[in-house]
Amino acid sequence: MLRSLREVIEWTSGAVGSFNVVDPLMALAVVSAAVQEGRPAIVGVATRHWEKMDAPVMVPSIRAIVERSSAAVALHLDHAKPSQLTIVREALDLGFTSIMIDGSTEPFEDNCAITEEVLKLAGRYGAGVEAELGAIAGEEGVAGLVDSHADESLYTDPGMAEAFVSRCEVDALAVSVGTAHGLYKAEPKLQLDLISELADRVSVPLVLHGATGVPDSAIVESVERGVRKINYFSGLLVEAMDEVRSPLPSNDTDYLGFRRRLYERWKEDAAEKIRLYAGIREAGE
């Protein structure tokens, strides 16, 4: 079932998992995991991958996968920059129900202005909007090695966040609390007290980007302190490339079998994250 950003967040206990995908098979694995777990999910496409994956061709298949499933799933455009409004409009025309506008590298007033513009545009389609305030290290969509920054000046300021959401009526706010896009060189240190303060000051759901490699215990506590949406992508890439690099006999031509193994790895990974983000503990924990 294709649903809005607000609906999948509201219908989720704990936090909803948002999984960026680069093709219909990856989307099918994520949606199948959501159906298996009986929980909502978000299927995302990053603007970084828009042209490389030929999104106007691929997205109708991805949307069909979402629409025919029994799980509540939002179709999300991730990390649209202020210069990428053409992609935002194209995504909305293709049926996306959620848009993330990332003006976090812009001055506060400019971030507000571009967010308000996207809010008006998305509103015509009934789509939700996620914004970002604060600097998150690393490059979205690139599973490279990164450091999560320790410069407190780059974290989301609670007062500014409160002012931002009071002016821009977004459906969710991505915040900088110690995570980064990519694969961590060392274990990241989430600013859990900052998450609590942001949740107290901000009236909209908080979003955590860069979840791959964050310890499960920190994920669980971040959700308990107010995070309601968690983005996950690099881990899916790692699963894919591990399968690609798995040795096979030189005469193996079972491409469909290879795709099935990819699907199963992605589904298992997504299902595990859906349970974790929802606060479901595994046996023995």
Image (tube, helix red, strand yellow):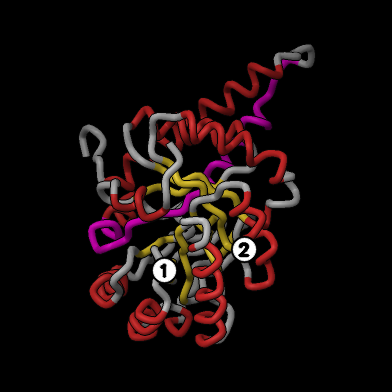
The total number of labels drawn is 2
Would you say 149 lies left or right of 237 here? left
- The part of the chain drawn in magenta is 221-249
Residue type at tag 2: Glu
Q: Report which quarter residue 285 is drawn in.
A: top left
Q: Please tell me which residue lies in front, 70 or 124.
A: 124
Residue lying farthest to the top in this orientation: 251
* Label 1: few (<14), some (14–19) or many (≥20) C-alpha neighbours in 10 Å: many
Would you say 270 lies left or right of 263 here? left
Which SS class for mark 1? loop
Q: Please tell me which residue lies in front, 38 or 118.
A: 118
Residue type at tag 1: Val
Q: Which residue is depicted at the point 37% across and 66% down?
A: 190
Tell me the residue that label 1 is attached to: 170
Would you say 105 lies left or right of 71 here? right
Residue 143 in view in this figure = no
